[in-house]
Amino acid sequence: MSKIHLLPPEIIARIAAGEVIERPAYAVKELLENSIDAVSTAITIQIVDAGLTKITVIDNGDGMDKEDLLESFRPHTTSKIIGDTLHSIKTLGFRGEALSSIAAISNMTIASRIKYAETGIQVTLTAGVFMQVSPIGMPPGTVVTVENLFYTVPARKKFLKSTRTEFRHIVDLVTHYALSHPHIHFTLTHNKKIILDLTATTDTLERVKSLLGNHTFTNLIPVKYQDGYVKLSGFVGKPQLATYTLDKHYLFVNKRKVGDRLISQAIKESYGNLLESTAYPIAIIFLEMPFEMVDVNVHPRKEQIAIHEGKVVYDTLSKAVSQTLTDHNLTFHNASWKEDFSEGVGRKGNMGAFAPQLLRESVTPWTISQEKDFFVDQVFQINNLYIVAQSSKGLFIVDQHAAHERILYEQYEDEYRKQQKIIATKHLKKGVLLDLSIADFQVVQENLKLFTNLGFLLEEFGTNKFMISAVPQLFENRNIEVLIQEIIDDIRDERVKNIDNRAKRMLSYLACRSAIMAGDPLTQAEGKNLIEKLQTCQLLYTCPHGRPTMIELKATELDKWFKRS
Ligand code: ADP
Ligand code: MG
C-alpha cells in the first residue's frame, strides 16, 4: 500500500496560512491593504490583545456585493488581476490568498455593502469553513472581524513575542501605511484605548509630524528628485537623529511598504562619515516608478520587491540624498570624539555602538590579562587614550574608556541591585518635553518603571509626550532628548528579552555614556586612581560590552623580542 497521500484541503490551507500569517501584524497588514485597495478614505483598526483575541478593520471603501463576498474568502480568488498581468500590479494585494489564509486559522466575519445596495451582507466562517450568510444594516464599506487568531494552529503562538511587542509591530505597520496614505483617515485602538486618530490631510508633512513627533519632524530634511522614470520624494533625518536599527527607515515603492536592504544601504552610504558605521539615518522615502519596473511577487509576505534596473534606482537615490545633505551644509567631515561628546548630540565614537561590531570579529589578537598586581607609583598616558603601568611580571596597557566603563558599570549595578535605583537623581530646573513617535511613546510607557529605577522621572504629558523632570545626575548636562531616544532604540532591540538583562544593558549604556572618553587627557593622579579602582572590579578584564580593558606584555615576551632568551 502506498504511504503518500494528499492532505485534506483544510489542513493544506492551515499549513500555508501559518507560513504567511506568522504574527498578528501580518493579518492586520493584509486587511489594511485590502481596505486601501478598496479606495477607502477612512480606515479604523480595532485590536484586542495584540490581535490574538480580536482584530476588526472597518473601511468605507468600494465594498462587495453578495456574489463577490461569497468568493472573496476562497483560496486564490481576487478581483485585482485580470488575465495574466502579474507583471504590472497596481494594487497592494494580488494573490487572492489573504482572506482565505486568515480565515483558515481564525473565526472570521466579513460584512460588506456596496454604495448602491440597500443593505450589507455578512458571512461568518469558522476555521475557514463557511457557516452562514445574512443581510445586515451597515454604511457602505467593509468590516472584517478576525477572532481567536491561530486557534487552529496553536503551535504558532509559541513563536510570538510579548503582547506589547506584537502590538508594537501593529503600530509600526499602521505608521507605515499612514505615512504613505495621508489622504486616509486612520484610527487605531488597542483594548478600546485610542492609540492614534489621524484625520485625512493632503500634506504629508503634517502626517509625518503627528506620527513621528515634533522632535523628529523638526530635524527632517525634505528630499525631492526626478530622474527619467524614477520619482523620489520624502525626508531624511539630520545625523543627530540616527539610530542603530533599521526601524526608522520608512521605505515605499509605489506606496507599498518595502523592507529593502539595498535601498537602506544606498541611503546610509550617502551620509558617508556623517554617521558612524553602525548607525542609520531616519528616512522616509517614497519611490515612484512605472508599475512594470517592479516585481512585487518575490516574497511570501510581499515585503520585498525586485526592481528592474535596480542599480540605476539605487544610484539615483544615493545621488538625491547626497545632494540634499550638501545643500543643507551637511557634508562628510572628520569630527573628533571630544567635540562630539562635549556637544552631547554627536554619535560618532559611541563605544556602545561599535562594541557589537568588535564582538562580531571573533579573532582576539590580544592576550587578555589575568593579573591584578599593578605597581601604580608611576603611570603614563599615551595618545590621551592608553595608560601604561608596570606590574610584577611586565607591563599593562589599559584602555581608559573601557576600564572606566567597567568600573562605573559595576558601581551602577551594585547600586541598582541594592536599591533598584541609581541614587543620584537630579531634578531639572526646567522640565524637558519629550515629543515621541507613537511607537516610541509605547516603548517608554511600557518601560516606565525601568526608567524610574535608573533615575529618570517621566510623566505622560499629552498625546505621545512625556515631561522629564529628573535625570540621573551624571546626565544633567547632556542632551536629554537624544539620550532617551538612544535608550529607546536600545530597548526596541528585540534580542534583549528579560527585564533584568534590559536593565543591565541600560546600565552598561549609562556607564558607556558617562565614562571618560578616549581623547580625554588624564593627570597622573587620575590615571593611578583609575587603575586602582579597576583592580577592585569583579570582571576587570573586559568592559560591559566585552572589549578588553587591558592587555599585558610580560617581561618574558619582551625578552624574546629583544633576543635575550
Ligand atoms: P487579494 O487582495 O490578493 O485580491 P484577498 O484574499 O485579500 O486577496 O481578498 C480577496 C478579494 O476580496 C479582493 O480581491 C477584493 O476583491 C475583495 N476584498 C477583500 N477585502 C476587501 C475590502 N476591504 N473591501 C472591498 N473588497 C475587498
Ligand atoms: Mg488582499
Image (tube, grey):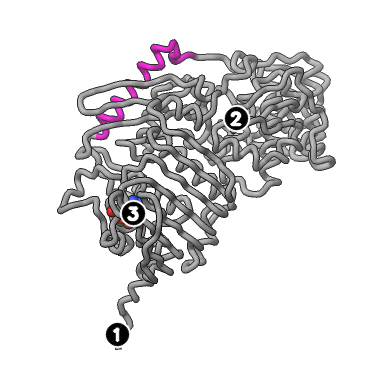
Q: Residue at x 37, y 52 (%)?
A: 142
Confirm whether the magenta stretch covers residue 327.
Answer: yes
Circle nearer the viewer, 3 or 2: 3
Report the side of 150 relative to 553 (left or right). left
Q: Is residue 545 shown above or below 161?
A: above
Q: Residue at x 62, y 15 (%)?
A: 343
Question: Across the whole image, how many numbered discs are drawn on residues?
Answer: 3
Q: Looking at the figure, which quarter contains the C terminus?
A: top right
Q: Residue at x 36, y 47 (%)?
A: 35
Residue 318 image-quadrant placement: top left
Determine which residue is flagged by label 2. 485
* Most distant residue in the bottom direction: 1
Which disc is residue 113 wearing? 3
Amino acid type at image mark 2: Gln
Is 190 in front, or is 457?
A: 190
Mark 3 → mark 2, Cα distance in angstroms:
45 Å
Amino acid type at image mark 1: Ser
Circle nearer the viewer, 1 or 2: 2
Q: Residue at x 37, y 66 (%)?
A: 134
Which disc is residue 382 wearing? none
Contact? badges 3 and 2 (CB < 8 Å): no
Residue 231 image-quadrant placement: top left
Element type where label 3 sits in the image: strand
Mark 1 → mark 2, Cα distance in angstroms:
61 Å
Is 78 in front, or is 509?
A: 78
Local packing at callout 1 (Cα closer than 10 Å; few below 14, some 14-19, many 20+) is few
Circle nearer the viewer, 3 or 1: 3
Q: Is residue 150 shown above or below 346?
A: below
Determine which residue is flagged by label 1. 2
Mark 3 → mark 1, Cα distance in angstroms:
49 Å
- Give the magenta range: 310-333
